Amino acid sequence: MKWFINIWRTLTKPAKYLTLGTVSLSAFLMGVIFWGGFNTALEMTNTEEFCISCHSMESMPYKELQETVHWSNHSGVRATCPDCHVPHNWSRKIARKIEASHDMWGWMLQTVNTPEKFEDKRLEMASREWKRFDRDNSLACKNCHNYDSMKWEDMSKLA
């Protein structure tokens, strides 16, 4: 109990202007506000609408996605850009957001802003994604696809 009294005295002991308790409480509240703002911004950049608007992707990859099974299928499940390109694990998500800043520079410097420029950079961008999928052992796919739940006998054979 003596340790509690010592802590209480330290926290309530007046400083020149503020008590340590007031400073600690203020720091805690500012941390909560910062975290809330940071997390809100993080989630806002984790939407298909954000991806399409910032990456000039609506003209090419987004239209291509609409022709795949990930867009329309018998189960009605649709994969969006973040489902495949943003990891669900928080630390990997932050690392991926930092990696994606490279794409933002490409957008700002207009290196992929036309179909021709996009096509010139397509292999480079795809190679980066393939390396990331390989590095992460296709974790983005496994977030939705559970191999134990698949009906392998009903799948079409690869040619």
Image (spheres, rainbow, N blue to C red):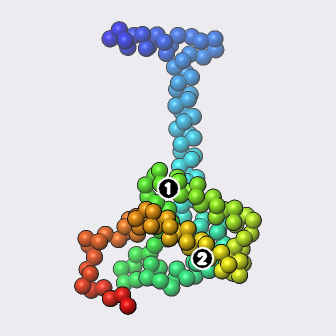
Query: In front here: 49 or 96?
Result: 96
Please determine whether, in this image, residue 112 is positioned above or below residue 73. Answer: above
Q: Residue at x 46, y 60 (%)?
A: 87
Question: Where, quadrant-wise, is the N terminus in this rendering?
Answer: top left
Q: Of the residues under marks 2 and 1, which one precedes in the sequence?
A: 1
Residue 48, can we see it? Answer: no
The amino acid marked with disc number 1 is Lys
Q: In this view, does 82 lie to the left or right of 53?
A: left
Disc 1 marks which residue? 93
The amino acid marked with disc number 2 is Leu
Where residue 135 sits in the image (x, y, percent)? 45, 63
The quadrant in which residue 120 appears is bottom right
The quadrant in which residue 74 appears is bottom left
Q: How many labels does the image show?
A: 2
Where residue 18 sits in the image (x, y, percent)? 60, 16
Camera-nearest label, 2 or 1: 2
For disc 2, the neighbor class at 10 Å (few under 14, some 14 to 19, many from 20) is few
Query: In front here: 156 or 5?
Result: 156
Question: Where, quadrant-wise, is the C terminus in this rendering?
Answer: bottom left
Q: Which residue is drawn at 59% across and 12% down?
A: 15
Please determine whether, in this image, residue 26 is positioned above or below residue 104. Answer: above
Disc 2 marks which residue? 123
For disc 1, the neighbor class at 10 Å (few under 14, some 14 to 19, many from 20) is some
* Secondary structure beneath label 1: helix
- In the rendering, which numbered label is found on residue 131? none
Where residue 80 sits in the image (x, y, percent)? 49, 71
Instruction: Give the CA distance from mark 2 to mark 1.
Output: 23 Å
* Secondary structure beneath label 2: helix
